[in-house]
Image (cartoon, rainbow, N blue to C red):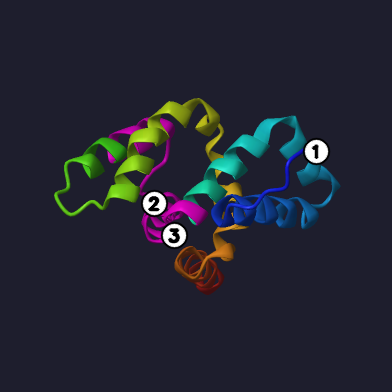
Amino acid sequence: MEPVTDPPVKRLVNLYRIVRATLDDGALDQLIEGHYRITQICLAIVVGNPTFGADLFEHILTGELKSGTELRDWCAAQLSKPDLDVRAGALVRELPFWLDEFSDWDAVREAIARVARFSFETGRVVGYQIAGAERH
């Protein structure tokens, strides 16, 4: 296997290893059984465009988006925004192709909570959501 030298790819691989290392046995079994794809997609969003990831993750964690269908509709609405940057646009165009992986919405929310802490932008969203949940 060739060593990974591209910095974003290296960061993605390293973050995936960190996520795996933090899981207990049950969560690791779930990850191995197929939830790794959700985790990888969420990590790619964090590495590829953390600002866009923070916006998307906030919509999911607050319950504004509750299903893959709503996510697909949200992506379509994002594409019509004139101020959408190129990298966010690329992510928005790709996400609908991965919606089959997002069929278990609880697993999506868990993956987001697990990976969002690896970026300042997305980490603030998760920190805010956790703080809000503790107040209720």
Looking at the image, residue 16 sits to the left or right of residue 38; the answer is right
How would you rate the neighbour count of disc 2 (Cα within 10 Å): few for under 14, some for 14-19, many for 20 or more? many
What label sits on residue 29 in the rendered view?
Answer: 1
Q: Which residue is rendered at x = 38% and y = 61% of the image?
A: 51
Gap between marks 1 and 3 measured at Cα: 28 Å
Location of residue 135 in the rendering, given as x and y in whole percent from the top left corner: 51, 74
Question: Which residue is labeled 3 in the image?
Answer: 50
Q: Which residue is rendered at x = 28% and y = 48% of the image?
A: 86
What label sits on residue 56 in the rendered view?
Answer: 2
Tell me, yes or no, whether the highlighted magenta stretch contains residue 49: yes
Does dot 2 land on a helix, a strand or a loop?
helix
Location of residue 109 in the rendering, given as x and y in whole percent from the top left corner: 54, 48
Does dot 1 land on a helix, a strand or a loop?
helix
Q: Examine the image and state in which quarter residue 72 appears.
A: top left
12 or 53, which is in the foreground? Answer: 12
Gap between marks 2 and 1 measured at Cα: 27 Å
